[in-house]
Amino acid sequence: MSTDPIAPGSAAPAVGTLPLPLVSRTVRVDPAELPADLLDLLPPDGGTSWLRRGDGLVAWGEVARITTSGPDRFADAEAAWRTAAARAVVRDEVRLPGTGPVAFGSFAFADASSAGGVLVVPSVVVGRRGETAWITAIDVAAVSAPPGPASLTRHERPASPGAVTYTDGALSAEGWQDAVAEAVAHIRAGDLDKVVLARDVVARTQEPLDARWVLHRLAADYPSCWTFAVDGLLGATPELLVRSEKGLVTSRVLAGTIRRTGDDDADLARAAILAHSSKDLEEHEYAVESLTRTLSPFCSSTNVPETPFVLHLPNVLHLATDVTGVLSTEGAAPVPSSLTLAAALHPTAAVAGTPTAAACALIGRIEGMDRARYAGPVGWVGADGDGEWGIALRSAELDRQDGHRLRLFAGCGIVAASVPSAELAESEAKLEPMRHALRTD
């Protein structure tokens, strides 16, 4: 394991070796002074976002960067952020989740992945929560100028990436179905109960891709999802791994999927089929039990609904369960941060399988690719430890050396009753959000 506890951003010295702290100043602004779409504030050369139904955070610039790797990537990032947050000088007149200094992060799915983990501390954060909006400026030693709406630039919408071509990723469609069949054989042999297999597809754009093109379309098409962009990973995830806010914890489990037809009456019928599907209910039960079992030691109480509900998205229907809990304050140990909870919950049965160790081992043997940060935690953490972390699903990884290339990902839960051709069709449905976001129509 190698760790660079806190490395500099452009023109910023390493915080871990600084005698002077991070300094942040948050001011309240009139929401009317901000664009209706906060993504309009992101600069052409990139930025960071975490938005749902128009609320959330956008950010740009880089004051500091925490990079980690290996099995301790979460713990090392958590320790480095706690040190930086404890030394920070904070002026915050809003005091809501997402105000004050924040770090945006994404982490690799697998311990051995070279993608590792990252927390990025931006220089400017703009947030909105209902009728409240704010701007936070973050720097080292001192904030150079008070933040305010006058300092913001509303950028023009990005240009189209042009025509997009797709090629197979690590496995062809036929090869991936063979992997599904192998997984089913292991499950029927009693080696494990469930495994989630992912596949990647490589997209190539005619023009260099401006990530904002994708983000604008994802946010418009999937407003109930969390539209994210962190360090070259972007997407719209329907799955909230964990939200920690003032002692309350929330997690949304999605497992069990059926493709929509586009016909409302037919989709209502498909929702009823999904809600009574023994295969999908079995897959969902594994995911809920796994998450609740992991979350319970951190909580004084938890609430788990008896039955899932059907989450309607434009392309698919999911079985969903919202698990809630109250963080325990007993004992001498500090209250766990949102990043600590995300690390404990990852990987969930919804992205790995059951039992987790056996599922991850099988994934490593037959999936044929490095997931990198796909299906890993992505989100943000504040100085007080509160934050929101989703699972990086319905996502793509930008190629840092080739501005025309990106990898799209999708995964499916495999159980004993799974049929390879049906799982391939489900993966195609899950690739649709990113494919549609890249189109010019």
Image: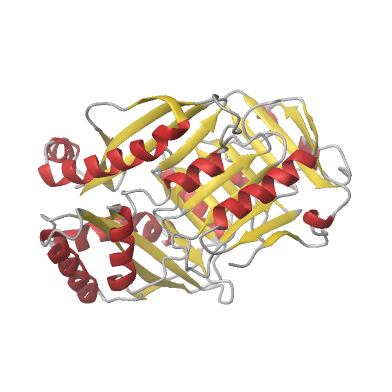
Task: State which quarter of the image contains the C terminus.
Answer: bottom left
Q: Is residue 4 left or right of residue 235?
A: right
Query: In terms of depth relative to the viewer, which is nearer, 438 or 256?
Result: 256
Residue 62: tell me if it is visible: no
Question: Residue 4 placed where, x, y %?
Answer: 69, 63
Task: State which quarter of the image contains the N terminus.
Answer: bottom right
Residue at the image point whose x is 33% and y is 58% from the top: 357
Query: In terms of depth relative to the viewer, which is nearer, 309 or 114?
Result: 114
Residue at the image point whose x is 76% and y is 53% from the top: 63
Residue at the image point whose x is 67% and y is 61% from the top: 45
Query: In terms of depth relative to the viewer, which is nearer, 438 or 382?
Result: 382
The image quarter in which residue 165 lies: bottom left
The image quarter in which residue 267 lies: top left
Residue at the image point whose x is 11% and y is 62% from the top: 189
Question: Residue 194 placed where, x, y %?
Answer: 22, 54
Position of residue 97 relative to residue 390, above or below, is above
Residue 290: tell me if it is visible: yes
Residue at the far front: name it.
332
Q: Is residue 314 left or right of residue 300?
A: left
Question: Residue 95 placed where, x, y %?
Answer: 69, 26
Q: Is residue 29 left or right of residue 322?
A: right
Q: Is residue 336 left or right of residue 263?
A: right
Question: Residue 50 placed where, x, y %?
Answer: 55, 44
